[in-house]
Amino acid sequence: QHLGKRVLTVRSERRDELQAVLREAFREAKRHDAVLLFDDCEPLLKASEPLFGDAFEEAAQSRQFLSELVGFEGITVLTTSDLDDLSPALNERVHLKLAFAAPDANRRAAIWRLHLPPLAPTAADVDCAALGARYTLSGAEFKAAVLHAVGVAAHRKESTPTLRQADLERGAERCDGPTTDAGQRRTAKLRLADVVLSPRLRAQVEELIEIG
């Protein structure tokens, strides 16, 4: 809004589509003088370039991303939870790095409220303050938790799916999960496509999310 520019958010869930997505994203950004936002861009930031398997494909995508970035004169924003894995070649092209601390309980409660669709039916027991105090979510985990809760609510086969506190707690518990051996929490990456729904319920869920 401050720049008077559109923001094009880029996220490809399928590795085999990423190279085509990159080409189209930079082409559209140039055409519309838009800001490019690459959300959860870890596959593009690899510091090493192994020569086989999936890692080789990720390295090829990183090289393509750098090539597109060099020819792009607009603004590009990258979000990542693994800044230490930034490749030297990309590091040279980053003009500004901003670290965001994990949100405290009050901020987590506010983020919960932002992720709940304002026109979606919610039960009277929904308590964002309690969710913020109990679950230490951050970043995309909030959206994943809400999507899971929406799926749970839809499966109750109510005429109008209603989000309850228990639904949101189940979603949060799915995301506020175990840590790796290195002490880092495993981040859940849940998409609407991962929620098993009938065609009718899927249409209702998609409408609910679109409203929000």
Image (spheres, helix red, strand yellow):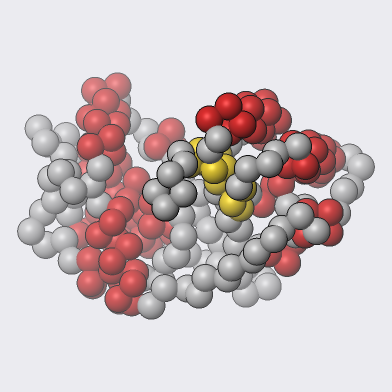
Can residue 202 be seen by looking at this rendering? yes
Instruction: Residue 173: give x, y in percent of width and height.
Output: 38, 62
Quarter occupied by the C terminus: top left
Task: Give the residue displayed 33% in from the left and 72% down from the top.
Answer: 107
Task: Give the residue displayed 42% in from the left and 66% down from the top.
Answer: 137
39 relative position to 48: left or right: left
Can residue 38 be seen by looking at this rendering? no
Instruction: Residue 19: give x, y in percent of width and height.
Output: 70, 30
Specify the farthest residue to the right. Answer: 51
Quadrant position of residue 57: top right
* 133 versus 6 height, above or below: below
Task: Give the residue displayed 61% in from the left and 31% down from the top.
Answer: 30
Front residue of 167 and 79: 79
169 relative position to 49: left or right: left
Instruction: Residue 109: give x, y in percent of width and height.
Output: 28, 69
Quadrant position of residue 166: bottom left
* 196 versus 190 height, above or below: above
* 185 versus 35 height, above or below: below
Instruction: Residue 120: give x, y in percent of width and height.
Output: 17, 44
Task: Give the residue displayed 34% in from the left and 46% down from the top.
Answer: 147
Q: How many labels does the image show?
A: 0
Front residue of 123 and 196: 123
Front residue of 59 and 168: 59
28 relative position to 88: left or right: left
Quadrant position of residue 191: top left
